[in-house]
Image: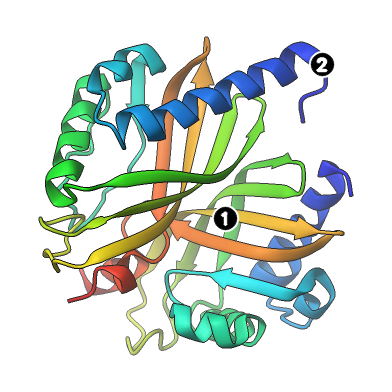
Amino acid sequence: MPTTDAERAQAEANKNTIRRLFDEVLTHDQLDMIDVLYHEDYEFDAPALAGSGAATSSGREAFKQRVVAFRQAFPDMKYIVQDFIGEGDLVVTKMLMTGTHKGPFAGFAPTGRFSEITGIHVAQFLDGKIRKTWAGFTNIAEALKP
Amino acid sequence: MTVEQNKAVIRRLFDEVMQGGKVEVLDEICAPDFMIESPVIPSAVAKQDSLGAYKKGVASFHEAFPDLQYTIKHIVGDGEKVGVDYVLNATHTGTFAGFAPTGRKIESPQLCYTELTNGKIKLLRFCSYGTPLLAQLQA
């Protein structure tokens, strides 16, 4: 729990960075913002994502490629921040992804349907930038079933 | 309620319900309009009776994985919200989701996002972020 004004201000700044990630990068395709919001040593923590066609490697460039792949799967993709929790160097986001499923995604063949997929995203910050992320979807199997 | 009080409620959820299997504790720590969002509970079922569906889910999970062990890595709070980053380790020794016991050891990193009101849980959202459980039993 933020105890000092400085920690509280940092938690709010971190939340704002997450808001920009979901809006500018994941909804509006501003891939160059990844270099602004993410730490140069960015790590993506996705232990052995079985059946996922997506690359799971770390680094800013790998993340840019993942966003491009997401956009191919859901051309009208939008990410909505439903709410978030900021404490210490972590921001936990309650998120919603919407879009029409036109390409393979996380092992699911395209359904052509408009889908709403809920999930949780965690970001760990260092020096005001996103240093590490890990995340999962809640209702993906139901939303993208054939 | 303070953030620390809300975290204490979520620790009870993990210790007594998820780890201990005492589903009746949910009657005490959940709000009347409690909602569950889980990869293994269909949304239509959750809309009808989230508390009942979650109790059933916990009980059947304990039958399938009696040695289950939850380990919390991070627990963070902000206002009336608490998030948990944790790992589930277990051995598959009972039938689960139609799968006969495989004897396999599974490890599943998971996340939980909760919202509380007056110290009672009104939303529980779960997800996993590694290889899905069913995929670990199938592979």
* Residue position for label 1: B112
Q: Dot 1 falls on which chain?
A: B
Name the amino acid, label 1. Cys
Which SS class for mark 2? loop
Q: Are marks 2 and 1 on the same chain?
A: no
Q: Is residue A96 above or below residue A25?
A: below
User: Residue A27 location, x and y as percent?
Assistant: 31, 37
User: Residue A24 location, x and y as percent?
Assistant: 35, 27
Q: How is the image coloured?
A: rainbow
Q: Dot 2 falls on which chain?
A: A
Label 2 and label 1: CA atoms lie apart by 27 Å
Name the residue: 45% across, 71% down: B91
In the depicted view, which residue is nearer to us: A108 or B110? A108
Name the residue: 19% across, 51% down: A74
**Which of pointers 2 and 1 indicates the residue nearer the eye?**
2
The numbered disc on residue A4 is 2
Q: Quadrant of residue A83?
A: top right
Name the residue: 65% across, 16% down: A10
Name the residue: 57% across, 33% down: A91
User: Residue A105 location, x and y as percent?
Assistant: 18, 55
In the depicted view, which residue is nearer to us: A44 or A35? A35
Which SS class for mark 1? strand
Horizontally, residue A103 falls left or right of residue A120, namely left
Would you call the spot at circle 1 few (<14 residues within 10 Å), some (14-19), or many (20 or more)? many
Q: Is residue A74 above or below residue A42?
A: below
Quadrant where the image shows the C terminus of chain B? bottom left
Horizontally, residue A55 falls left or right of residue B32, namely left
Q: Quadrant of residue B96?
A: bottom left
Q: Is residue A132 above or below residue A117?
A: above
